[in-house]
Image (tube, rainbow, N blue to C red):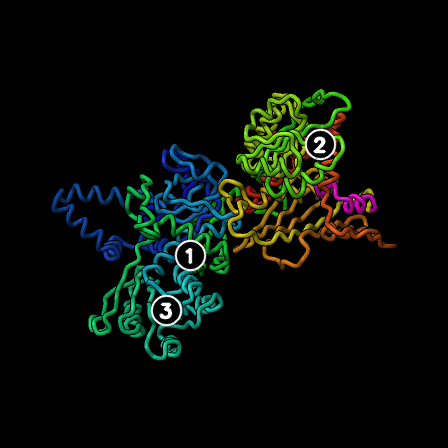
Amino acid sequence: MKQVVQNYKSGELALLDVPVPGCKPGGVLVRTAYSLISTGTELMKVSEAGMSMLGKARSRPDQVAKVVQSVATNGVPATYRKVMGKLDSYTPLGYSLCGVVEQVGDGIDDVKAGDLVACAGNEHALHAELNWVPKNLYTPVPDSLAPRHAAFGTVGSIALQGVRQGESRLGEVALVVGLGLIGQLVAQLLTASGVRVVGADPDPARCELAERLGAAACGDPASPAVESAVAELTDGHGVDQVYLAAGGGSNQPVELAARLCRDRGRVVDIGKCRLDLPWNAYYEKELDVRFSRSYGPGRYDPEYEIEGRDYPIGYVRWTERRNLACFLDLVARGRVDVEPLITRTADFDDAVETYQRLKDGELKAVAVLFRYPEQAAGDGPSADAPVVSVPVVPAGAGSSAPVRAARTPVRLAFVGAGNYATSMLLPHLARRDGVELSTVVTTTALSAANAQRKFGFREATTDLDAVLGDASVDAVFVVTRHSSHAELTRKALLAGKAVFVEKPLALTGEELTGVLDAVEESGNDRLQVGFNRRFAPLLQEAGKRFGARTGPASLRYLVNAGRLDHGSWYLQQGTEGSRFAGEGGHFVDTASWLLGADPVSVYALAPSGNEDLQVVLGYPDGSTATISYVTTGAAGFPKETLDLVADGKVLQLDDFVRSSVYDGRKRWVSSRLPKARDKGQSAELAAFVRAVRTGGPMPVPLGSLVATTAATLAVRAALAGGAPVTLAEAR
């Protein structure tokens, strides 16, 4: 693999081929998607490496003191060899990245391979294609957060820890000295917490950027503008806190802090600037000088960082890892905006050139990202695009349906009896001729008893195995929480039952493969997933009116999903998957049915600050389907609207209440406006029961169910990679 390194003696920068790190216990191996250059800390290190030996000594007096002590202990020759050996070695750069977990070490149970994580640490989150990261230095990335934004996690944690040290309160006024990357983030965090911010920086562009992102006023510290703004905002008393986010050898920042801070105010040093405190000024105001140590409690403690020993939250509320997770959450919810801070996104292969341009001043930047090879985005799938395998449907499975006695009712068992089962499925089945509700299985006895009483099940139980072993049961409905769908489906197929499983069929590729392994092992492919939209009467009729097409089509599907109520189990993304993983199959299936094919590529974007998604599906004939899955729309707007355009015709669906077709000569509008939206559940259930009764084909081919599920799961991979992924049948 490749890694950015520097020789501190010569100043040489290189993109070096190095061995892949092993995945040790207590951590994860992460493949980097984006890493962030800290334009302050890293450029200071790069600049120091280019100095003469005397210059290096002057810039690091702490290291000179260690050398002097070593001479006294070990003598000049031994110390010289030690110092030269250390200087003439390659050292790593980087400490803030986002990537995908490639391998999980022993003792790790909070993430799995394929998860997107943000990582920290100047020994573990390096500018390298692969990094081993211990548990307390990574955190999962919220589903709605783009990987390039998650790469700011560590630098954001540094800014966040500085703000915590300042103990800011609502309504206070703060001065941020230095509006580089850290200063910009500090200003945004303070603004988000209700503090008015004045910024000081000699660069007008950085001042303008900070004001655009929420600062009350910014200006050159040498001009009267900053002092005037402070006087106006504080009635002449001075700011409550000063945050020193500047670097360099000037003592101006600490002198400015003393002049503009109020009596008994707080001065927090976050950057690395000169700190010759003017004694009289600080003494007379009794200023409280504080230091902010990097990302927060745990930093430099090997028991925390390497051995993974967390601090109890009751004693240490905000550790390194908790700060990292907190900052990502703020960005995901739109309280902090990092996109305007990104001056350049460079390919990782151009790392050395990028550092050189930064060092020479040719590239003026607040933040620079490295994009790693697999994240290079294009206009569409290519030979080099990431590939997601679609599991192969076993050949010859289900050649004969399970034998059942003629003229007997179809006996159904329900596993789960929650809101969807009792409101959208069971009312249709309870009044259908030729159907017997045999057994309902739930984890709690009371919910089973309620379903039995309301819908007339013959039996109610909490024993799943007894139901699967009951030869009289023809079909099993799996209507439980998402995380259990694949395993329950697998068990029911192996028991020889026809299965109706509510979406999603699976939450991971491994789960999907497990279902197909059960099909192959049992020879039973009697499976239907609850993709009901294709059965909706209005959509069926509109599809017939639209007719066959000859050229590629363009489909737009707007899903105004809305926000979930607090406490909804849909929000338990760690166990139940993302909202789109759970619900998105509906919309992928509808698009594929209308276009008459399975998707071959998936591209996805997630705007910062919410759960909105833009998903673009590509089809074999060049057709495309764009699914806009949004949670931030107006509650009164229809939930689902769809447009299909091809061959001079347009099909429109308005929330399953009205459908229209325009063919250039006339417009057809659905003749009926149903009192309630019919999204096809009744027709889908009728088709499933008929297939079970007659032994005929399932309503939707198994290959289509698998392709839809694989495409839905590929959205996460597309978001993580920032590029389209190709869906290819596994070989």
Q: Which residue is mark 1?
A: 358
In the rendered structure, which amino acid carries the disc numbered 2?
Pro
Between residue 186 and residue 18, name the one nearer to us.
186
Residue 216 is marked as none
Q: Nearer the observer, disc 2 or disc 3?
A: 2
Range drawn in magenta: 531-545
Spatial separation of the CA atoms under disc 2 and disc 1:
56 Å
Q: What separation in Å lies between label 3 and label 1 (alpha carbons)?
A: 30 Å
Disc number placed over residue 174 in the picture, else none: 3
Q: Secondary structure at mark 2?
A: loop
Vertical relation: 492 (above or below) 14: above
Image mark for residue 701:
2
Residue 571: x, y in percent?
52, 47
* Mark toward the viewer: 3 or 1: 3
Relative to residue 423, is residue 246 drawn left or right?
left
Q: Which badge, 2 or 3, is on the more N-terminal residue?
A: 3
Residue 373 screen position, x and y as percent:
51, 43
Secondary structure at badge 1 equals helix
Query: Mark 3 belongs to which amino acid?
Result: Ala
Magenta stretch: residue 533 in it? yes
Q: Nearer the viewer, mark 2 or mark 1?
A: 2
Residue 248 sits in which quadrant?
bottom left
Q: Position of residue 16 (x, y in %)?
A: 40, 41
Q: Quadrant of residue 454?
A: top right
Residue at position x 43%, y 54% from top?
A: 327
| Sequence-first disc among 2 and 1 | 1
Magenta segment includes 199: no
